[in-house]
Amino acid sequence: MSHPATLRSQSEALAANLPALMAQAHMLAASVLPGAHGRKRAGAGDEFWQYRQATSSDWGARIDWRRSARADVHFVRETEWQAAQAVTLWVDRSQAMQFTGHKSRAAKAERARLLGLALSVLLLKGGERVGLMPDMPPRAGRAQLDPLALSLVTDTDQDYGTPPDMALPSHSQAVFLSDFLGDPKPVQDAVGRAADRGIGGALVQILDPVEEEFPYQGRSIFESMAGALRHETLRANDLQTRYRARLAERRDMLASLARVTGWQLLTHHTDQPASSALMWLWQQLDAGRGR
Amino acid sequence: MFSIGPLGFASPLLLAALVALPALWWLLRAVPPAPVIRRFPGVALLIGLKDETTETDKTPLWLLLLRALAVAALIFGFAGPVLNPQAARDGDGPLLIALDASWASARDWPRRMDRVTDLLSEAQRAGRPVAVVALTDLPPGETPFRAADFWAERVPGLTPAPFTADPDSLSDWLTELPASFDTYWLSDGLDHPYRADLLTALQTRGAVTVYETSRPPLALAPPTLREGVISLTAHRPAGLPAQTIEITATGRDPAGIERLLHRAEAEFAAGATTARVDLTLQPELRNRITRFQIAGERSAGAVALSDDALQRRKVALLTGREGREGLDLLSPFFYLRQALEPVADLIESPSVDDLLLTAPDVLILVDIAQLAEIESAQILDFVNDGGLLLRFAGPRLAASDVARAEEDPLLPVRLRIGGRTVGGAMSWGAPRELREFSNDSPFAGLSIPRDVTISAQVLAQPDPALSERTIAALADGTPLVTRKFSGEGQVVLIHTTANAEWSSLPLSGLFVQMLERLAVSTRPAAPTAEAMAGTQWQPERALDGFGQILDASQRPVIPGERMAEGRFGPDLPPGVYRSAAGSLALNIGQPDMELRPTQWPASVIVERDTIAEERDLTALFLTLGLGLLLIDILAALWVSGRLRNATAVLALLTLGLHHGPAQADDRLALQATSDMVLGHVLTGDTRVDQVARAGLLGLSRVLYARTSVEPGPPIGVDIEADELTFFPFLYWPITEDTPIPSDAATARLNRYLRGGGMILFDTRDAELAGLTRTTPEARRLQAIARALDIPPLEPVPDDHILTRTFYLIQDFPGRHTGRDVWVEAAPPDAERAEGMPFRNLNDGVTPVIIGGHDWASAWAVDDQGRPMVRLGMGFSGEEQREMAYRFGINLITHVLTGNYKSDQVHVPALLERLGQ
């Protein structure tokens, strides 16, 4: 257990990043206009749906007197049913995500965090419930945003991230943001388990362009970010094609996993604008919610 | 010294290190280049992949060779390689290195300096004290014998003098010399008067070695002009094979730039000491020549400066007193102009005052009898100061009483009344021909065409002095041209007219030749010593030993006596000197000079420059070794794959080098002229410049879309450097610290404004200016505009053309609205045209528009064509932007069409006229 003083200074250092991240996430979220996502039927919600003639089973208090005063009959004001949806995020915070291929580009973790938080902002604005793996169950309301952001900026010491084993509410949605470069087995398990419970979702593979291209040459020793894995080669350029083949294989695996479970897969590169990925995610979740 | 062929080594033992090369070879083969450690998350995918080859773990062969070469070069370098090592010179004790350092040694000066450097390094090795003395620049007091490295620093400062050593100061210097030393004498190869004495004096003190180069010196005598032909003579020592030299003539072209004007070849026959070439140049070209030079000769002796003897004369012509319009061919001035214009600068004026103010060489009076007293006095002064007064006779002179009874100071002879007519309708005699010119006449040698006849003349009174004053006469002996010296000048009278009325002389070429002779004779080629006495000469240009021309106007004035002496020295370098009477060139080369090589006695060792030079190759080898090592670094980086960025940087660097500023200017010109282009003045404030550019881009797009004006992309203009003429319109945003243009830029801006350009000054402060009386930007604008040629201004009147060139608008909003925009004021007498709502205004286009509405911001669009700056709120902001664009369109239309719309006031009149 860490000393309170250390903990505090660390938290403050972390919190120092928060406003910027928050601001970025808000800005990003503002670029996606949240439209009406009602169920196209009367129910609990904010939006006006229709005036309906009151029946004997209606509560007196529900009668809309202003409308009824213009006619001889009584009217009830109905609102559109807007069901809140639960979305659980998994944002990979392992060391592998700290990688950036060029100093002008942000690390993959930054991008994952930004996407996660922006999506949360959007969803919370839309009245949905948002949770974060491993230990934040979905909750609605803006109050959820700060704890979300706080837990997003902490990193783990793990080399590659694995989705934690967390019971998700059934028929909710899940979004996994990771590079999926580590052991694929836990991911397959987690997605499979979720799909069994009727949970839909999306996988976003965030990669640096360098990881896509493998532009290395000469005698090199490659180390994983935490240093656990090591590979030495005499001619890095010879490995390029084979590395790319393996990367494609990994992507195929993810795609087939998504196909089988009905999830969606997006490969996002850190040199692309974050808004495109956010837009895609929003559309996927929207579609999933409509189901 | 250990040596292999011509290569010697100072420390040959170090060469043993070459043995280590094979060991190095083996070592490099054995050790592969160090790996690069890279953090890379994708390593998870790499695990298990095997390398296909194991080749690159060894250093590649070419890299090995490179490294071995580098090390070998370093080993050679440290071993002290010397090319052509020379046996050490005998002798110890002090060494005097004496240099003639005269103009004749300038042509191979670097070789002499190399020799001195070699001698110094030898002396340093032997530890001998040395003194280096240029005989033309003797050290004051005792000659300092110092360590060789003291002198090594001073060798680059030695220069040859444009003269030879002075025997008197040499003998003074000899007395101060110590009793015993060896001498090494770098001779210039010529036999100078001091040579023998100095040699004996030096030989009494120790051994004398002489060094001479094998190239003989050449000298060029000053040009002589005779009958329009320039002759040049080059001199060289006797006993040499045939040789061809090239002589160039240099002078200023009409633009004042020094140019090579002519080139000629002169040939020395085998054994001959002189080569002569005659040049016949057009007078115009001849007048421009400032110096002749033997091409390829770097020596003061090979340059011959020219002075007034070749220059164009200034001829003043007193004209037009009668004020009647005559026929050209009857006017005497016509013949004079025809004759003089090609060879002289003609100044014409009816006022003697004006003419004399221009300080002419020659004053010509044509058939003028009586002059006002004050004019006579002025002209007499002019003549006495060395001017030439040339008078022509004519009916008026013949009829006047001038010089009847006594001699007029402004006429060479007394005249008989009436003159005479021969060969006219009322006389018996035939027109007279000219007698051959006598040898002492300035016209001597001119051939007389048979058809030149004289039918009328004024006659001289017989006088004892008449015959010596006559320089040309008719066949019957009556004087035709008389001359009288007066003070330093002369008065010449031609006893006939300057037109063809009295004689056919003006119709012939002889007339031109005579005038030329007379003008040439105004300045003697070389003034005598008596003439020089008491005069003061200001040096204008001087030659240094290498024949370079230096500005000498800062040097003290030299008395004529010293000039007449003619012996060059530090106080009197060869060059061009000017006095009140004109300029005089003093040259080293003389027409009668003789270049004699020195005959050295047998007791002197004479070294020639044929010895192969000793060259220390240490630096070469070390540089080579280090260079190879540098290449090795790059190569090693490349092999290990770390060079990607470096190559990109190199590529960028080489690209960058190709874009010179010279091209930039042409690019600007091309870009600005291939389309109509709007320009904005660069302020140095990045943001302002960016907005100005974006603003003009926005305006250009709107113009393109709505009008037939199709501008190219706008260009930022640096008023200090760029040409403004390409831009019909400049937008100039003023910031608080816009630099005030330099004088040159101000002149350019004024030229631009006068030439029809328009500048829109924008202080961008309309919102502030409403609150305070002035803003910093406005003050800065005032400071900038103070030097500009800006007419009186007024706020744009309601009927100004800007309100209707394209759109009908009444105000001119930019990012700000309100507040006046100022344009050139209408003339006060402008009146409202009949039947028109506007006045009949001035014709011109206003050269400036001044306002503070920050138009660029309102026009500004980004690359996608979206507005860059937000205006106002919502729709009203967009409306304001639209109005700003309309103002822009009106403005550019106004710039391009000028007052076209203003002419509409005449439309009713035009229609009426058409109807008829």
Image (cartoon, coloured by chain):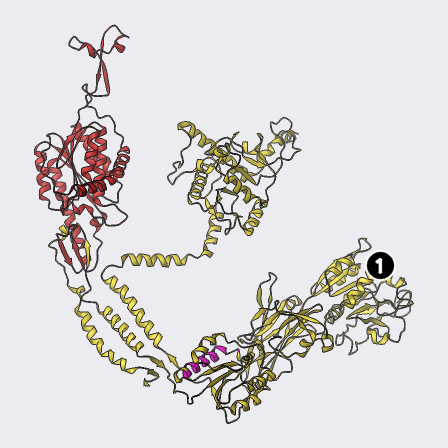
In what quadrant of the picture does the N terminus of chain B appear?
bottom left
Q: Chain of mark 1?
A: B
On screen, residue B612 above or below B776:
below
Looking at the picture, how far across and down is residue A129, in whole percent?
17, 29
Looking at the picture, how far across and down is residue B393, in whole percent?
84, 65
Q: What residue do we see at 61% from left, 61% from top?
A: B254
Q: Tell me if B382 is positioned left or right of B788 in this view.
A: right
Q: Tell me if B516 is positioned left or right of B46 in this view.
A: right
Magenta segment boundaries in residue numbering: B106-123
Residue B86 on the magenta span: no
Tag 1 secondary structure: loop
Principal secondary structure, stretch drawn in magenta: helix
The extreme top residue here reads A72
- Which residue in the protein does label 1 denote? B372
Residue B117 on the magenta span: yes
On screen, residue B820 above or below B632:
above
Q: Quadrant of residue B471?
A: bottom right
Q: Amino acid at mark 1?
A: Ala
Q: Tell me, what hue is chain B? A: yellow
Q: Quadrant of residue B358?
A: bottom right
Q: Tell me, what hue is chain A? A: red
Looking at the picture, how far across and down is residue B48, in whole percent?
10, 54
Q: What residue do we see at 81% from left, 65% from top?
A: B380
Query: How many other residues sit within 10 Å of disc 1, few (<14), some (14-19) or many (≥20)?
Result: few
